């Protein structure tokens, strides 16, 4: 496996876990670390966008337990937001970066924002794409959508995890339906994923859910974030827009780029997404 890796791809042991990352671009360019969605990997983003991001030093990280990073035991203590942020800081130190831009997608937005809260001195700005930051609200959105799609009425619970479980009980493929406004986009991502040969184990999701992810109201921590924040939002992703993005715009005065796209806006129009990212980082 190691013999097949391109230059710039690395395995490193940090915080007692084996992490995989790709480091591409000039050392003197603005550094961006891509933080993928919950339990996913960085392969498809690099595969689709990498050739257009040559002006930056791009670091694509497979977070702990995900993608090409080392497998971990089924221990919830290994899967916490603090652990994921500590991994990011350990990677910064390993790479010798003074400052960088965290680029968080979906759940990765929480890691990007929490890193900026704890390590503001190392952050130029934060860019988040279709962020998830308020999980009780997300569970309501999911249950409402599942009820609408299945035309089945389910009594809403005061427990956010129960709402999420009820939503996926109604429609197992709920996220796929809500994330992809165009079937071609879903097929595109599935094709790239099949090329990677990477499949999630689900341990990350299970660990974070065990640690009360569905109760997380991250906007409570917004007052402690001093970095400037930009949101790139696919308007057709109802899991994020507008209920999640509004928190960042209203409370952090975040800059907002709205694209005609779903949860993975670089699938619908890669060049438009890249232009939005370049404007955000400039």
Image: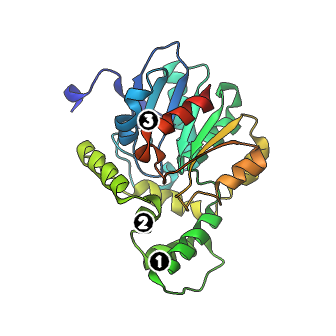
Q: How is the image coloured?
A: rainbow
Residue at 61 percent of width and 22 percent of height: 99
Residue 177, numbered label: 2
Measured from the top left, where is residue 13 in percent x and y? 41, 31
Q: Quadrant of the N terminus?
A: top left
Along the horizontal axis of the image, is 132 left or right of 172? right
Along the horizontal axis of the image, is 220 left or right of 45? right
Residue 149, numbered label: 1
Provide the secondary structure element on which disc 2 rests. helix
Residue at 35 percent of width and 27 percent of height: 10
Image height of 32 relative to 148, above or below: above
N-terminal of the pair, mark 2 or mark 3, is 3
| Count of labels in the image | 3
Query: Mark 2 packing: few (<14 Cα in 10 Å), some, or many (20+)?
Result: some
- CB of mark 1 within 8 Å of CB of mark 2? yes
N-terminal of the pair, mark 1 or mark 3, is 3
Measured from the top left, where is residue 130 in percent x and y? 56, 50
Measured from the top left, where is residue 244 in percent x and y? 64, 56
Image height of 20 relative to 158, above or below: above
Residue at 55 percent of width and 75 percent of height: 143
Residue 61, numbered label: 3
Provide the secondary structure element on which disc 1 rests. helix
């Amino acid at each position: 496996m190691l013999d097949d890796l391109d230059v710039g791809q690395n395995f490193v042991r940090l915080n007692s876990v084996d992490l995989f990352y790709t480091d591409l671009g000039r050392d003197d360019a603005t550094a961006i670390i891509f933080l993928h969605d919950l339990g996913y990997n960085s392969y498809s983003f690099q595969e689709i966008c990498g050739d257009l991001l040559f002006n930056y030093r791009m670091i694509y990280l497979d977070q702990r337990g995900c993608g090409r990073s080392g497998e971990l035991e089924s221990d919830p203590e290994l899967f916490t937001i603090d652990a994921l942020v500590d991994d990011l800081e350990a990677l910064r130190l390993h790479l010798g970066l003074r400052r960088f831009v965290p680029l968080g997608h979906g759940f990765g937005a929480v890691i990007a924002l929490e890193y900026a809260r704890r390590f503001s001195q190392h952050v130029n700005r934060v860019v988040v794409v279709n962020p998830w930051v308020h999980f009780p609200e997300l569970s309501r959105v999911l249950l409402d959508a599942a009820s609408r799609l299945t035309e089945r009425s389910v009594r809403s619970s005061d427990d956010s995890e129960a709402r999420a479980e009820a939503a996926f009980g109604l429609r197992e493929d709920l996220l796929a339906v809500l994330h992809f406004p165009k079937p071609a986009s879903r097929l595109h991502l599935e094709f790239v994923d099949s090329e990677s040969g990477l499949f999630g184990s689900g341990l990350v999701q299970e660990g974070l859910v065990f640690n009360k992810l569905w109760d997380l109201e991250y906007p409570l921590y917004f007052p402690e974030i001093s970095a400037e924040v930009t949101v790139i939002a696919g308007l057709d992703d109802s899991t994020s827009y507008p209920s999640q993005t509004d928190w960042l715009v209203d409370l952090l005065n975040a800059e907002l780029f709205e694209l005609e796209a779903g949860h993975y806006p670089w699938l619908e129009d890669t060049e438009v997404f890249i232009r939005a990212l370049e404007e955000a980082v400039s």
